[in-house]
């Protein structure tokens, strides 16, 4: 025959396990992060050095006439040149989303005398987000 104390211990353990599972499930949902604020701030500031520190080893880059997959070093040169020629005066995130280990942001940028539509796609590694794709394309605004 099971003692009342044993039943109480079993019930308490079940409640504790359920609570721990609930807390862990919130952590998993929270792990799907938006594009890092550091990346978005670098775009807003026209900061090529900070932005390029988030580039993956190879980056799909679409800026002006450059439209290809570039090494991190090549992409750094292209984005540095763009920001040197086009001082960013405004950047606004319009839409963002996540799926699995990827996140994206779509926004508008005013730089120089032009308006651009910006798309950035990142993938989360074990330690940080890396930019896989960056598109800065002229918009009709």
Image (spheres, grey):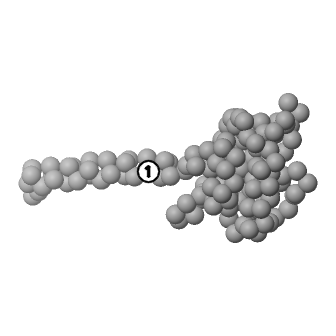
Query: Which residue is the site of mark 1?
Result: 27
Residue drawn 64% across the image and 48% down it? 42
The front one of 75 and 122 is 75
Coordinates of residue 124 in the picture (x, y in percent): 59, 59
Residue drawn 81% across the image and 64% down it? 69
Task: Tell me the quarter of the picture where residue 56 sits.
Answer: bottom right
Name the image quarter holding the C terminus: top right
The front one of 13 and 70 is 70
The front one of 108 and 9 is 108
Mark 1, residues whose alpha carbon is within 10 Å: few (<14), some, or many (≥20)?
few
Task: Tell me the quarter of the picture where residue 68 sits.
Answer: bottom right
Coordinates of residue 83 in the picture (x, y in percent): 76, 49
Name the image quarter holding the N terminus: bottom left
Question: Which residue occupies the extreme right position in the image?
Answer: 65
Q: Is residue 85 visible?
A: yes
**Drawn side of residue 113 relative to residue 24, left or right:** right
Residue drawn 74% across the image and 61% down it? 76
Relative height, residue 3 to residue 140 (above, below): below
Q: Is residue 34 visible?
A: no
Coordinates of residue 39 in the picture (x, y in percent): 62, 50
Relative height, residue 105 to residue 67 (above, below): above
The front one of 95 and 5 is 95
**Drawn side of residue 105 relative to residue 140, left or right:** left
Residue drawn 86% across the image and 41% down it? 138
Coordinates of residue 78 in the picture (x, y in percent): 80, 59
Q: Secondary structure at mark 1?
A: helix
Q: How many marks?
A: 1
């Amino acid at each position: 025959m099971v003692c009342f104390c044993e039943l109480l211990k079993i019930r308490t353990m079940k409640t504790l396990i359920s609570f721990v599972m609930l807390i862990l499930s919130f952590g998993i949902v929270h792990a799907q992060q938006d594009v890092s604020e550091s990346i978005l701030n670098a775009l807003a500031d026209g900061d090529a050095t900070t932005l390029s520190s988030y580039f993956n080893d190879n980056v799909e880059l679409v800026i002006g006439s450059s439209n290809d997959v570039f090494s991190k070093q090549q992409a750094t040169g292209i984005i540095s040149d763009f920001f040197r020629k086009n001082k960013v005066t405004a950047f606004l995130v319009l839409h963002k989303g996540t799926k699995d280990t990827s996140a994206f942001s779509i926004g508008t940028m005013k730089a120089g005398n032009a308006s651009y539509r910006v798309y950035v796609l990142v993938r989360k590694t074990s330690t940080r987000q890396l930019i896989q794709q960056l598109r800065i394309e002229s918009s009709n605004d």
